[in-house]
């Protein structure tokens, strides 16, 4: 699997606890309820408590609880206010006006200067933070300024990158107050008093067992969703995250009332269909095939790429993972803003044509076994063999696959990309399909598509939604008609909440600050 910054060496189940943007309604200041803690299953301990450095699913969970964002994403991927009440944007800059009366977790005022310092530290290459390429563009020069009197923070880029504002919803962009910035080592290891800007503070940490969060009194920086519906009930005053690495164990605990929330990628999710449970199914992984287009590899030939696309049936690929995913028409699914849904520009399955082109051709296929043991890789191997190709499958662990393919240190011709698109944007995948080859860049397939590059650049140069989607349409058409990628399907995750609990689901994930309990 690959995420937006680097490969994630985790199994599919570990990714199920991922969190994306979103928060709860601004008209509902904190006022905890419930007779006991809200019990929430995560698959592992956090690697870090520093939001800027988070790269794993549990890291994102912890960051969203403790650190607020300037903006959040709504159910339709639109941007809604967070710590910022409003903003103005140009292709190369954005100015955010902060809400009045913001405070850090120790009650001290949160100023525009403080917010600017947090963003400056996140953007600084020396920090080694995650997500900066998606927020500012690869290798971008970033300038952050502030005006305390006006409560404004301005982010200026050296070149256009119109995803700047929505990227401020990433958990890596969570705002850290001065105490955390002064001691980043302590911030990464555990809670630092006064460092938080989010609705919850971590009050107890038992590594390998559980973590307890308490709701801040009077916290009122919850964004007002326009599309997502906030469920009925009270916000829990205490949220307890328990380490439950096995999905069947989590399912048992959810069914007996020991847990209020868990996420499932396997068959245990079916146990909660009906019966009063609240089940939200969302895309987790976006699966698509990519070619090594460098000289000496068959992927350099457009005819070979077209034949591979004709040999594969995305609907059959989807069935390998249970048939609950979405057959994609791009490198992302229809939940991504501006994603192509027109099947006419995607190469159709044509096994007879594929056999004419692939008979006797040797193909080195590589894939990660971190997704259901690599069953999708096996499907691709068999489909290409059925077309007459001689296919050698290298089905390896995620770290090895990342080295072989993403770093281009191995000998491969075709790979099945398992993309953990936490941002739910086209940009997250696009940055892997253009630019310099590794190690200078991230274009692991060595793709050179001028039409795609032009459309991508145009999309990043406008903040107008219609103009951006038109540009993305050009980019996707250019890539798909050349068969530089072969869209397959999503692999979904089921977020299951108990009969007396529910939450807001936005941008493909549950927002943990939106949990509600009844009774």
Image: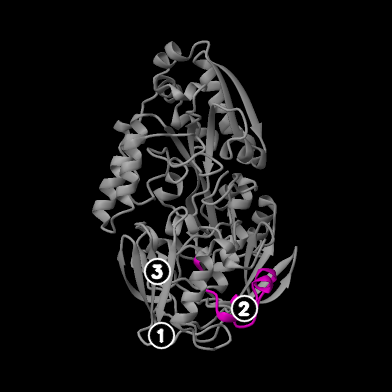
- Viewer-closest of 475 and 230: 475
Percent x, y for residue 233? 48, 74
The residue at which mark 2 appears reads as 182
Q: Are marks 2 and 3 in contact (CB under 8 Å)?
A: no
In the picture, the quarter occupied by the C terminus is bottom right
> Which residue range is magenta in the image?
173-194
Provide the secondary structure element on which disc 1 rests. loop
* Mark number, residue 148: 1
Rendered image quadrant of residue 392: top right
> Mark 1 vs mark 3: which is more N-terminal?
1
Q: Which mark is residue 68?
A: none
Instruction: Provide residue 485's location: percent of width, then percent of height.
Output: 43, 33
Looking at the picture, does residue 417 appear above or below residue 134? above
Q: Front-most of 273 and 345? A: 345
Question: Within the magenta stretch, is there residue 187?
Answer: yes
Look at mark 3 in the image and give the residue it sits on: 155
Q: Residue at x 45, y 21 (%)?
A: 311
């Amino acid at each position: 699997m690959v995420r937006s910054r680097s490969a994630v060496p985790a199994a599919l189940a570990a990714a199920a606890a991922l969190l994306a943007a979103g928060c709860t309604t601004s008209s509902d200041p904190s006022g905890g309820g419930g007779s006991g803690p809200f019990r929430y299953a995560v698959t592992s301990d956090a690697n870090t408590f520093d939001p800027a450095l988070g790269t794993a699913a549990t890291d994102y969970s912890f960051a969203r609880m403790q650190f607020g964002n300037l903006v959040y994403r709504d159910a339709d991927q639109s941007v809604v206010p967070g710590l910022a009440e409003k903003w103005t944007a140009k292709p190369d800059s954005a100015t955010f006006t902060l809400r009045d009366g913001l405070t850090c977790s120790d009650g001290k005022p949160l100023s525009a200067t403080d917010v600017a310092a947090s963003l400056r530290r996140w953007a600084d290459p020396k920090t080694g933070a995650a997500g900066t390429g998606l927020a500012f563009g690869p290798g971008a020069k970033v300038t952050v300024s502030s005006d305390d009197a006006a409560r404004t923070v301005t982010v200026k880029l050296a070149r256009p990158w119109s995803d700047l504002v929505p990227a401020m919803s990433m958990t890596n962009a969570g705002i850290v107050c001065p105490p955390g910035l002064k001691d980043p080592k302590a911030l990464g290891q555990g809670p630092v008093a006064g460092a938080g800007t989010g609705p919850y503070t971590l009050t107890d940490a038992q590594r390998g067992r559980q973590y307890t969060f308490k709701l801040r009194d009077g916290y009122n920086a919850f964004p007002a969703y326009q599309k997502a519906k906030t469920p009925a009930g009270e916000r829990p005053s205490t949220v307890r995250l328990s380490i439950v690495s096995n999905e069947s164990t989590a399912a048992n605990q959810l069914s007996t009332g020991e847990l209020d929330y868990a996420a499932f990628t396997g068959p245990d999710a079916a146990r909660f269909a009906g019966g009063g449970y609240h089940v939200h199914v969302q895309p987790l992984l976006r699966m698509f095939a990519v070619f090594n287009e460098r000289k000496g590899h068959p992927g350099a030939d457009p005819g070979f790429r077209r034949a591979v696309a004709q040999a594969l049936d995305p609907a059959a690929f989807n069935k390998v993972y249970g048939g609950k995913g979405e057959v994609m028409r791009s490198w992302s699914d229809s939940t991504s803003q501006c994603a192509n849904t027109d099947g006419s520009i995607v190469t159709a399955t044509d096994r007879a044509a594929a056999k004419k082109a692939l008979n006797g051709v040797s193909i080195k296929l590589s894939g990660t076994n971190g997704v259901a043991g690599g069953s999708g890789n096996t499907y691709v191997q068999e489909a290409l063999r059925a077309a007459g190709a001689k296919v050698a499958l290298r089905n390896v662990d995620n770290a090895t696959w990342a080295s072989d393919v993403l770093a281009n240190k191995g000998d491969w011709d075709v790979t099945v990309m398992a993309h953990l698109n936490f941002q739910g944007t086209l940009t997250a995948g696009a940055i892997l399909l253009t630019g310099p080859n590794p190690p200078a860049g991230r274009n692991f397939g060595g793709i050179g598509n001028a039409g795609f590059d032009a459309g991508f650049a145009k999309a990043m140069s406008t903040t107008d939604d219609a103009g951006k989607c038109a540009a993305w349409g050009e980019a996707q058409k250019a890539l798909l008609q050349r068969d530089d990628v072969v869209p397959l399907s999503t692999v979904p995750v089921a977020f299951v909440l108990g009969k007396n609990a529910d939450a807001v689901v936005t941008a493909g994930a549950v927002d943990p600050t939106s949990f509600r309990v009844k009774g």
